[in-house]
Image (tube, grey):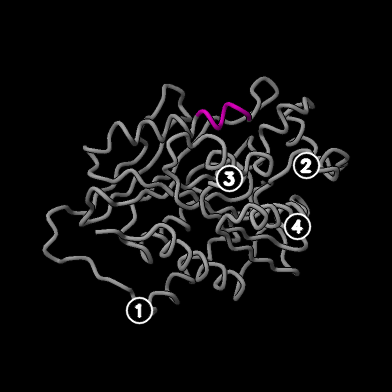
């Protein structure tokens, strides 16, 4: 939720290390379609309703799109914060289309929910409307960090009415806004963020991914740190347990000595796991 994205700049280093890993399939050099990048495309009328899309070469009617959702406590942040993930994915999983969005930011007059979920829905609708133009398939995945992880889980569990999402990854994303540690939080910055949602329990339940999870929810990848000052690890563990109860495919990766983001070997370990999960759950289907 806080802007710790500098921690993830070393994804560039992780990408270089992973570049030596063998790829399961190379793109056809005789491809008809070249790669294409479109930036600051409008999916709505608000200045924040823009996104970048990176279309891979050789794309076809089954090419999946992975949507990146930035964090920032629901009240700040920018799609550029996700550029290290964007670059890692484009290098390591070159068959994917990658969409990186901005969404409207919350303030005292504009609650995060449902506003930001509606923005994701608008982007998904825009991608569907332009699918023939982009020459992409309908399959989707999500990767979000912090507040973006929360939004990615929530949209995938409760708002994917056409079951297009095949995998969702949350890095240190909140899962339960009714958590007692949140209801009684005294940390000024955390309190400011949580108060954006208000105190209505019905709304907080609707805005909490753990209460929206169903047996047919998409495969889920979770990363949490044991010393996170903003998202208690119990939030990830409780979602993990609920995923197990409902027999939803998932992986849970816990770094006991890490906080709200991490560096070094643990970051490399996370990126290897992310790549493998996407390869498996959102594969390149000819």
Q: Mark 2: which secondary structure?
A: helix
Quarter of the image for residue 162 reads top left
Q: Nearer the viewer, residue 159 or 109?
A: 159
Q: Mark 4: which secondary structure?
A: helix
Marks 4 and 2 sit apart, C-alpha to C-alpha, by 15 Å
Q: Which residue is mark 1?
A: 22
Determine contact: label 4, label 1, CB under 8 Å.
Answer: no
Q: Mark 3: which secondary structure?
A: helix
Q: Which residue is mark 2?
A: 190
Q: How many marks?
A: 4
Marks 4 and 3 sit apart, C-alpha to C-alpha, by 16 Å
Q: Which residue is mark 3?
A: 153
Q: Which residue is mark 4?
A: 233
Indicate which disc, 2 or 1, sits on the residue closer to the N terminus.
Answer: 1
* Residue stretch in magenta: 113-118
Image height check: is 51 above or below 267? above
Residue shown at 21% from the left, 37% from the top: 133
Q: Mark 1: which secondary structure?
A: loop
Marks 3 and 1 sit apart, C-alpha to C-alpha, by 30 Å
Q: Nearer the viewer, mark 4 or mark 2?
A: 4
Indicate which disc, 4 or 1, sits on the residue closer to the N terminus.
Answer: 1
Indicate which disc, 4 or 2, sits on the residue closer to the N terminus.
Answer: 2
Indicate which disc, 4 or 3, sits on the residue closer to the N terminus.
Answer: 3
């Amino acid at each position: 939720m806080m802007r710790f994205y500098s921690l993830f700049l070393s994804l560039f280093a992780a990408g270089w290390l992973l570049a030596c890993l063998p790829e399961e399939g190379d793109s056809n050099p005789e491809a008809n379609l070249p790669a294409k990048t479109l930036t600051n495309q409008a999916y709505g009328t608000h200045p924040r309703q823009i996104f970048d899309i990176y279309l891979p070469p050789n794309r076809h009617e089954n090419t999946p799109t992975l949507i990146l959702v930035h964090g920032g406590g629901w009240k700040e942040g920018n799609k550029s914060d996700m550029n290290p993930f964007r670059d890692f994915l484009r290098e390591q999983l070159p068959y994917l289309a990658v969409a990186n969005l901005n969404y409207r930011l919350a303030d005292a007059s504009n609650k995060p929910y449902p506003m930001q979920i509606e923005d994701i829905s608008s982007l998904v609708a825009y991608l569907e409307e332009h699918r023939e133009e982009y020459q992409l398939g309908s399959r989707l995945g999500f990767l979000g960090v912090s507040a973006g992880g929360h939004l990615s889980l929530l949209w995938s569990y409760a708002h994917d009415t056409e079951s297009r999402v095949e995998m969702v990854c949350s890095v240190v994303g909140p899962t339960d806004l009714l958590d007692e540690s949140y209801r009684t939080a005294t940390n000024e910055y955390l309190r400011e963020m949580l108060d954006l949602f208000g105190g209505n329990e019905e709304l907080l339940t609707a805005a909490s991914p753990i209460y929206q999870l169903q047996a047919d929810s998409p495969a889920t990848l979770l990363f949490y740190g044991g010393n996170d000052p903003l998202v208690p690890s119990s939030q990830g563990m409780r979602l993990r347990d609920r995923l197990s109860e409902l027999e939803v495919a998932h992986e849970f990766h816990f770094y006991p000595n890490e906080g709200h983001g991490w560096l070094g070997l643990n970051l490399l370990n996370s990126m290897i796991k992310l790549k493998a999960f996407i390869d498996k759950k959102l594969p390149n289907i000819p």
